[in-house]
Amino acid sequence: MTPGELRDALCSIFCGDLTVREVPAGLAVSAMFEGADGDRLGCLVEQHGLGWGLSDDGAFLGDLEGYGVDVRKGGRADFLARALRPAGARVDPDTLQIVADLEGEPSAGDILAFLAALSRAQDVAFWTKERVRSTFKEDATRALREVLGEAADLQGSTAVDARLAEIPADLVIRPRGSGEGGAVTAVFLVQALDALQEALLLALELRAQQRRDVRVAAMIEDNSVNMSAAKAVRAVNRIDAVAFFRNDEKEAAFKIARTAIPNLAVAA
């Protein structure tokens, strides 16, 4: 097979599964790519004044939100931003449509890139809770390392010590040296109330053992956790520190770090 024959064969496959039709708003393009629901992915090409826009119908992300999947913030929002960036696309926070704004008339390459971005974005539907949690943990760990610097060691998924082995924390801050006021601090990463309950259990166990050498903190990913619930109120009133991470990551990390090292200087 020659390069030309291969090109013609590939073109016939792709073009045979691509449709373009006129609709009142502009042109509707349907691609060979399938979405999570098995339907073909497509986009609308329409003119806005002197510019042009590409968009999906908003059903994909709208349906996910209807099922209780938050795509507006947190790990899923970060993933979508990365998946859409190569096509210059973004998520409209009001309509949950995936859109791309163009200064001039879109080329075939612009449209194919947008359709490919829609295909990549479909992966967000298959994220497990474990993957979302992993993303939050990676981000929180990175932020804490930056503010702690050389002042403390940061360990993941471990207990404070053998006496508290049954209640491991997501992260444990161990200050270096014998700085005044410093203490080992167990950090729980909270995306649901269950994690706050774990923090509460550790705080109560520390009281039972009459220990003052360990502190307990909670890093809450965003405001999707119902902090007015009785479980949340009970936990917050008994642990040493609570911080909200998303949209204020550095200050949240610094607040938790100061729980372990009160005299920690803020990083430049």
Image (spheres, rainbow, N blue to C red):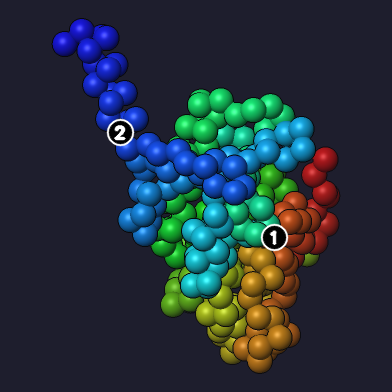
Residue 222 x %, y %:
67, 66
The amino acid on which the numbered mark 2 sits, given as a three-letter code, is Gly
Dot 1 falls on a residue whose secondary structure is: loop
Q: Determine the residue positioned at 52% across, 37% down.
A: 114
Numbered tag placed on residue 130 in the rendering: none
In primary-sequence order, the first of circles 1 and 2 is 2
Work out how far the residue at label 1 is from the one at label 2, CA to CA, in angstroms. Answer: 35 Å
Q: Determine the residue positioned at 55% across, 64% down.
A: 62
Residue 180 x %, y %:
79, 60
From the viewer's side, name the closer residue of 131 and 208. Answer: 131
Horizontal arrangement in the rendering, residue 154 relative to residue 151 (left or right): left
Quadrant for the C terminus in the image: top right
Horizontal arrangement in the rendering, residue 248 relative to residue 234 (left or right): right
Q: Mark 2 points at which residue?
A: 16
Q: Mark 1 points at which residue?
A: 94
Mark 2 Cα within 10 Å, few/some/many (few <14, many 20+)? few
Residue 35 x %, y %:
39, 52
Q: Determine the residue positioned at 41% across, 62% down.
A: 128
From the viewer's side, name the closer residue of 52 and 126. Answer: 52
From the viewer's side, name the closer residue of 230 and 11. Answer: 11
Horizontal arrangement in the rendering, residue 77 relative to residue 178 (left or right): left
Q: Determine the residue positioned at 32% across, 37% down.
A: 17
Residue 102 in sight here? yes
Horizontal arrangement in the rendering, residue 138 relative to residue 224 (left or right): left
Residue 78 in sight here? no
**Discs 1/2, front:** 2
